[in-house]
Image (spheres, rainbow, N blue to C red):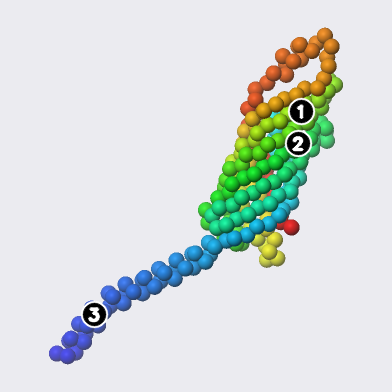
Amino acid sequence: MKMKKLILILLCCIPFTIKCSAELIEQENQCLLEEKSAVDKSFFYWSVGAGSHSNIKFIPLPGIGLGYRYQHNYIGFDISADAGILPALGSLMFKLSPALLVYPYPDDTSEYYCGLSCGICFFYQPHVYRSGSNNTIGLLPELVAGYQFQTDSGREYFVEFRPGLSLILDRDNHHDFGMLNDFYKRKDKKKNLYPTAGIRFGLSF
């Protein structure tokens, strides 16, 4: 009789034991997940890349840049200054771009991210078929999608793709055509919204 009671008590304890074990495992997994996702880092970086611009249509404009990036868990912030040059056309471009980044699965060593950027750019291009130049100032809202990883030495690398739209705020043409001024002014009236795309590689220092 006592044996039956003991067995009955043990059987009643099994569900309680399983439940407690499951709760402990869940708590441990949650702690591990929180520990893994606790990412807090920042770094300065150099970048190289290429992208299209409205003034030179689909010719890629190579460039270099300097930036700063900060990440706290799922949210990050990036600001960069880039300069591009196309020697064949004598074209120059300068861009300042702040960006808000989101890391869906934050990790110290390897992670994907996406975000939004809205930069301001200045573009200078001399006219190839006549004297003078074309100076353009515009806004450049972009989507950002990239991959960031850290090497064993602690150095950060990233590669990202940035499709966007170039919104022309001001276009200033410096040239004198004499009697043909009115004709060329009409010819230079263009739309103010252009699709753009760029790719960028960065490394911390």
Q: Quadrant of residue 153?
A: bottom right
Q: Is residue 73 left or right of residue 55?
A: left
Residue 183 in percent (x, y) is at 76, 11
The residue beneath circle 2 is 93
The residue beneath circle 3 is 11
Does 91 sit above or below residue 30?
A: above
- Relative depth, front residue between 180 and 5: 180
Q: Is residue 164 left or right of residue 96?
A: left
Give the amino acid type for the residue marked by disc 2 in the picture. Met
Residue 151 in percent (x, y) is at 67, 62
Q: Residues within 10 Å of mark 1 (few under 14, many from 20)?
A: some
- Measured in 3D between alpha carbons, the distance from the residue under mark 2 to the one under mark 1, in whole angstroms, is 10 Å
Does 187 sit above or below residue 160?
A: above
Q: Earlier in the sequence, mark 3 or mark 1?
A: 3
The residue under the point 58% across, 43% down is 116
The residue under the point 75% across, 24% down is 172
Q: Is residue 196 left or right of residue 14?
A: right
Q: Earlier in the sequence, mark 3 or mark 2?
A: 3
The residue under the point 65% across, 25% down is 192
Tell how many labels. 3
Give the amino acid type for the residue marked by disc 3 in the picture. Leu
The quadrant of the image that shows the C terminus is bottom right
Give the amino acid type for the residue marked by disc 1 in the picture. Asn
The residue beneath circle 1 is 135
- Measured in 3D between alpha carbons, the distance from the residue under mark 3 to the one under mark 2, in whole angstroms, is 77 Å
- Measured in 3D between alpha carbons, the distance from the residue under mark 3 to the one under mark 1, in whole angstroms, is 84 Å
Residue 194 numbered tag: none
The residue under the point 23% across, 80% down is 11
Query: Is mark 3 in CB contact (under 8 Å) with mark 2?
Result: no
Q: Which SS class for mark 2?
A: strand
